[in-house]
Amino acid sequence: MEGYLGRVSRFFTFNFRNINPIEKEIYLHGLRRLGDYYRMKEINDRQYNSLKLELPQTKETEQIILRHGELKIVDDLLKIYRQIEKIDPKDKKLKELRTMILDEIDTL
């Protein structure tokens, strides 16, 4: 829940008066994609956790496991991003990491 709240609060504190309309659209599009990622991850986590109770491997369970691995890549990148942001919020690596995160979300 904190992930949603943090992004929403950043949205409201972001000053749109002094920003280019194209940059504003890019920012809002990124927020939407990140929200889609969190919804997808929540659903997949529930499915993945329910698989621990099932023993037979079906095509559906293989897809859930594969998707879980793909989502884990984005999750790991987000953890790295948060760690760097805590140390230095103005680090130049953050922009590159944001791009990598959004690119990975686009492949899902």
Image (cartoon, grey):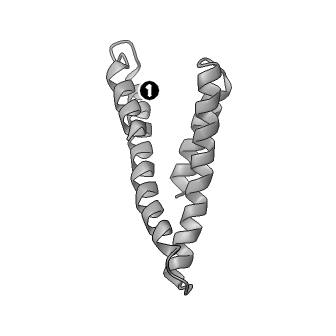
12 relative to 59, above or below: above
Residue 61 vs residue 106, the one in the foreground: 61
Q: Position of residue 103 (x, y in %)?
A: 57, 46
Query: How many numbered marks, from 0 up?
Result: 1
Q: At 57% across and 43% down in the image, what residue appears? A: 101
Q: At 43% across and 45% down in the image, what residue appears? A: 33
Q: Residues within 10 Å of mark 1 (few under 14, many from 20)?
A: few
Q: Quadrant of residue 24?
A: top left
42 relative to 99, above or below: below
Name the residue at the front extreme.
Answer: 53
Name the residue at the top extreme.
Answer: 18
Q: Position of residue 56 (x, y in %)?
A: 55, 87
Q: Position of residue 15 (x, y in %)?
A: 36, 16
The secondary structure type at the circle numbered 1 is: helix
Q: Quadrant of the N terminus?
A: top left
66 relative to 106, above or below: below
Q: Is residue 49 left or right of residue 12?
A: right
Identify which amino acid the numbered label 1 is placed on: Glu
Q: At 55% across and 84% down in the image, what residue appears? A: 55
46 relative to 9, above or below: below
Q: Position of residue 82 (x, y in %)?
A: 58, 32
Q: At 66% across and 22% down in the image, what residue appears? A: 92
Where does label 1 land, which residue? 23
Q: Is residue 88 left or right of residue 22?
A: right
